[in-house]
Image (cartoon, rainbow, N blue to C red):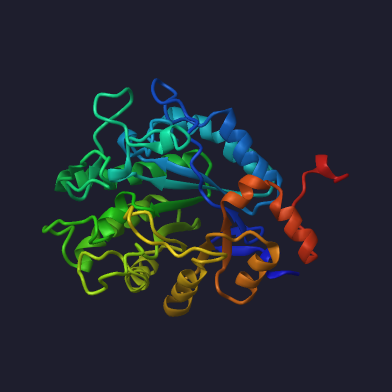
Amino acid sequence: MAALLTPYDLRSLTIPNRIWMAPMCQYSAAPEGESAGAPTDWHLAHLGARATGGTGLVMTEATAVSPEGRISPYDLGIWNDVQVDAFRRITAFVKTQGSVPAVQLAHAGRKASTERTWVEQGRPLKPGEPHAWTPLGPSAVPFGPESTTPRELTADGIGEVVGQFAAAARRALAAGFEVAEIHGAHGYLLHEFLSPHSNHRTDGYGGTFEGRIRLALEVVDAVRAVWPDDLPVFFRVSATDWLTENPQDERDGWTADDTVRFAKHLHARGVDLLDVSSGGNAPGARVVTGPGYQVPFAERVRDEVGMPVAAVGEITEPAQAEEIVAAGRADAVLLGRELLRDPYWARRAARELGGRVAVPAQYHRA
């Protein structure tokens, strides 16, 4: 059987294949009221379609651990029990299709309080506009020239964020999720603390490498403490900020070397798999893209740390994905836009590679 189609074991969990759905924001939750942040029929159809399509692991979009942790007012959240109840029917359906439901726990940090991406290109909301709020960050440094300057988190505020991640993990478990991923990529709060490009603090949460990774490790410890020992925790990282003009400048940004060093800490603290992406923290960065352009970052972590990894980024063809897994460059692939285009991509991969994925009984004629 093709390596891409083989099961993968993490702790007590068996994921039926190596084709996984990357988190992709839908901006389709209510922005206010009792149901704010709760998944809707749209999310059931969106996530459920990928499960019926044979995807081995189906991950929600970035799901905020607090109201101010949303990217936009229309994002999903998991900070209250109304949201938990709404998620239960989705996780239950995903499981009936043989897929594993996963949640990405997130805090948007200084990139919070924006419009939906299809409304004025997701521009930052201005203070006083409906649903706007003041973002939080490691330092009072805005993401871009049009962005609101964030409020710098105090030590007490940082402690509150750690507690919010832990509470969200407890709720995620009650909602039926079997994998919890901590979002530390794409210029959101944990990534902002990691990178010297956005973290200008001089206290114990900034300055040195050890100071900048401190919050992320505290969040990992808090989530791992409440998440069952027999279920896996993932961490999504941006392997590089893609700021390479002045590599000796301490404010240059987060690098691939930093990622390898950081991964060793994560692995030692019980993170089971590193989801390796890149970029998102510096709007002026020059990202070099192309088919599988982020795979080398994942491969390096796997080789140098001995830690399971998932690769993401312009992975579109079954043969391409099979090569990545079969060659040991990553343990799984995460598909984003390609699964938006084709919810049944896993079934196509099975046909092209000569294998099988789970197919609903209702589709037996297909």
Relative image position of residue 25 (x, y in whole percent): 48, 41
Q: Give the left or right position of residue 262, taking residue 154 as reference.
A: right
Q: Residue furthest top?
A: 33
Q: Give the left or right position of residue 140, taking residue 131 as reference.
A: left
Front one among 186 and 268: 186
Decide if residue 198 is in sight here: yes
Q: Residue furthest left?
A: 202
Q: Give the left or right position of residue 73, taking residue 319 as reference.
A: left
Q: Residue at x 61, y 70 (%)?
A: 325
Q: Residue furthest right?
A: 365
Q: Which quadrant of the view contains residue 97?
A: top right
Relative image position of residue 179 (x, y in whole percent): 50, 52
Quadrant occupied by the N terminus:
bottom right
Relative image position of residue 74 (x, y in whole percent): 43, 31
Relative image position of residue 207 (x, y in whole percent): 16, 63
Looking at the image, is 330 positioned above or below residue 228? Answer: below
Front one among 346 and 359: 346
Q: Residue at x 29, y 24 (%)?
A: 129
Q: Residue at x 51, y 66 (%)?
A: 293
Count of marks overlaid on the render: 0
Q: Give the left or right position of residue 114, taking residue 275 as reference.
A: left
Q: Residue at x 33, y 33 (%)?
A: 67
Front one among 148 and 356: 148
Decide if residue 357 is in sight here: no
Front one among 331 and 137: 137
